[in-house]
Image: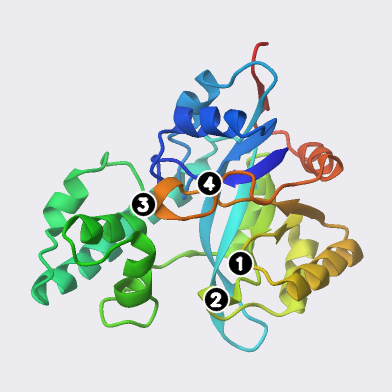
Amino acid sequence: MIDLHLHSSASDGTDAPADVVRLAAAAGVTTLALTDHDTTAGWAEAAAAVPPGVRLVRGAEFSTTSPDGRGGEVPAHLLGYLFDPGHPAVLADQQRLRVERRRRIRVMAQRMADAGYGVDPDELESRLDPDAPIGRPHLGRALVELGVVGSVGEAFESLLAKGGRFYEPKADTPIAEAVDTIRAAGGVAVWAHPWARLRGDVIEPEVIADLAERGLAGIEVDHRDHTPADRDRLRGLAGELGLVVTGSSDYHGENKTIPIAAETTAPDQLDALLARATGARVITGGT
């Protein structure tokens, strides 16, 4: 089985990078990708933990914004695989986003503290490495520990949702620029869950077509937030545009209920993806 979208505690997952690798292997995954938000900090630990017979595709999930095809802008997530983590454009983008993430969460935490929820912005930041990307799930876990909500999911539904009274947007990277950055660093770019309608507005097919011309390599089609009808449409669109089709769990440990390998990628699609990458190598356990 192949799962190309997993998160660790290097960003907003709850399992250490090495544990993500071990859990994936125990679940029968033969190729996994570590794709933490806006960081490659977990790469070394994950690579050291790969067991024989398992392959690790190192990547990251880039925070971006995209035209929606209707005159507006929407948040978008872009998976970058096998890029050079030391490329200047990658380093600059990830550093800017880490700073922006901390600003945003501090604003949200302070709003909650002012409203009497007992959140301490300084204590929240002190839990993380200074270079680690912080996100709403970290704030959600703090709310669980305080007894405000019963789960991180409940925190998102009741307090952290976009447009809510505590929400603060962050300045993400334009998706076309992120595709250029990944490609310049020798990697390949896949649009993560582009039609996850429960998360908000989605983009028109024309936007995917425009980005394919820019160098987008694939679409994450099989994802729990995609309806069967949308999967069929996206699969057809990928065929028309010559894009790779992936499927992934988007695993976050205890922060989400989805298990590893709940969605998977076909071997031929993985091969097509890897053939386009030159920035970093696949790690194979036991070699």
Q: Are marks 1 and 2 in contact (CB under 8 Å)?
A: yes
Q: Residue at x 20, y 55 (%)?
A: 145
Q: Residue at x 56, y 52 (%)?
A: 250
* Residue position for label 1: 225
Q: CA distance from mark 1 to mark 3?
A: 26 Å
Q: Are marks 2 and 4 in contact (CB under 8 Å)?
A: no
- Considering every residue shown, the one lying at the far top of the view is 287
Q: Are marks 4 and 3 in contact (CB under 8 Å)?
A: no
* Residue position for label 2: 198
Q: Position of residue 120 (x, y in %)?
A: 11, 58
Rendered view: 125 above or below 30: below
How crowded is the residue under tag 3: few (<14 C-alpha within 10 Å), some, or many (20+)? many
Q: Amino acid at mark 1?
A: Asp
Q: Mark 1: which secondary structure?
A: loop
Q: Residue at x 65, y 56 (%)?
A: 179
Residue 217 in view, yes or no: no
Asked whether, in this view, residue 1 is left or right of residue 84, the answer is right
Camera-side mark, 2 or 3: 2
Q: CA distance from mark 1 to mark 2?
A: 7 Å
Q: Mark 2: which secondary structure?
A: helix
Q: CA distance from mark 2 to mark 4?
A: 32 Å
Camera-side mark, 1 or 4: 1
Q: Amino acid at mark 3?
A: Arg
Marking on residue 98: 3
Rendered view: 162 above or below 110: below
Q: Position of residue 263 (x, y in %)?
A: 68, 51
Determine the image quadrant of residue 74. bottom right
Comes first in the chain, label 2 or label 3:
3
Q: Position of residue 240 (x, y in %)?
A: 91, 66
Q: Residue at x 63, y 63 (%)?
A: 193
* Residue position for label 4: 89
